[in-house]
Amino acid sequence: MRNALLIFWRVLITIWLLSLVGCSAVRISYNNAEILARYRASDYVDLTSAQVEEFKLRFTVLHRWHRERELPEYMLLLQSAGGRIAKGVTAEDVSWAIVNLRMHYRLVTSRAAEESASLLAGLDAGQLVDLEKNFIESNVKFEKENLAGDARRMRRKHIQKIEGYVTDWTGTLTDQQLVRISGFVDHYMSVMSLRLEDRRRWQHEMLTLLRTERDPARLAPRLVAMFARPENARTPKYQEVMTRYEAVIGELVVDLDRMLTPEQRARALKRMQGYVDDLAALTGRRPVPAPS
């Protein structure tokens, strides 16, 4: 969580993201998104009564748009993803998923930036100081969870985390699958320090922007640029590493798919269909055949 804007849209986009990593209770989470967002926002910024009311109003507008505009698209994407899993995932399928996820991420973050510009422009000096303190605390937590301590213990921790994501979809993993995940974790751990460095850069730039730009009309497009296209401000080194990291993730997905047993594939497809059903219930629409 980076600031009030991130909290503002994250609960929405997380519904899509978590459908890929194994979250449950999608309908409950989505229908209570505004309450969840306000609760999480309070961990970072204490809003005044007037700001709380504005937050609720802006979030309601964003949430309605997201339900009407985005959820039907997510349902089609998940249906198409299910068809691809049934046939066996290729590198082209992974590229398709990344392109679509990035497109919807940018669309949602852009809309949320526009909706929240007025609220963020009204944060006072004390609130921004609190936000800066929470940035520091979140970075300490990130470093502790991803970088600090014995290297072997940290590596095993990351292996277990990724194994958990995959197991939610497939059930018990084979020895071959476990070895493949272990190999990926070496790449995963290599980007953590650069990711922390980029977090700190981004946070500094965000705080500077919020302290110097108080006009919502001018703030909104700058927020859109920061959130929707974060890669534009990355260092060349970090961007190069993340491009390679994205490719390595794609290779992992394809390799694990090739190793799936019939039972694992059936379980993954059943879980995917469950999310399609959830989205259908949230939108009030029946699933229809999706384009491949």
Image (cartoon, grey):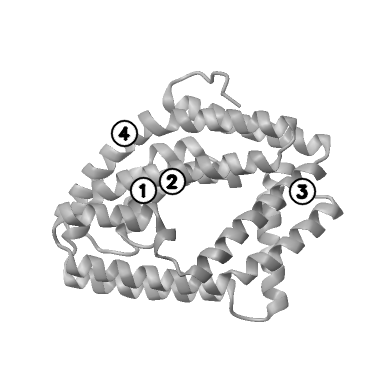
Which mark's residue is nearer the viewer, 2 or 4?
A: 2
> Residue 161 at x, y = what percent?
66, 60
On screen, residue 193 above or below 252: below
**Residue of label 3:** 255
CB within 8 Å, label 4 to label 1: no
Q: Is residue 198 left or right of residue 262?
A: left
Q: Is residue 107 left or right of residue 55?
A: right
Residue pictured at 82% horizontal, 45% vertical = 259
State the quadrant of the N terminus. bottom left
Provide the secondary structure element on which disc 3 rests. helix
Distance between mark 1 and mark 2 Cα atoms: 6 Å
In the rendered structure, which amino acid carries the disc numbered 2? Answer: Tyr
Distance between mark 2 and mark 4 Cα atoms: 17 Å
Frontmost residue, 32 versus 161: 161
| Residue 64's disc number | 4
* Among numbered discs 4 and 3, the one appearing first in the sequence: 4
* Among numbered discs 4 and 1, the one appearing first in the sequence: 4
**Residue of label 2:** 105
Is any part of residue 235 visible from this angle?
yes
Q: Is residue 287 left or right of residue 187?
A: left
Residue pictured at 21% horizontal, 57% vertical = 219
CB within 8 Å, label 2 to label 4: no
**Residue of label 1:** 109
> Residue 52 at x, y = what percent?
21, 52
Would you call the spot at circle 4 few (<14 residues within 10 Å), some (14-19), or many (20 or more)? few
State the quadrant of the C terminus. top right
In the rendered structure, which amino acid carries the disc numbered 3? Answer: Asp
* Among numbered discs 2 and 3, the one appearing first in the sequence: 2
Would you call the spot at circle 2 few (<14 residues within 10 Å), some (14-19), or many (20 or more)? many
Which mark's residue is nearer the viewer, 4 or 3?
A: 3
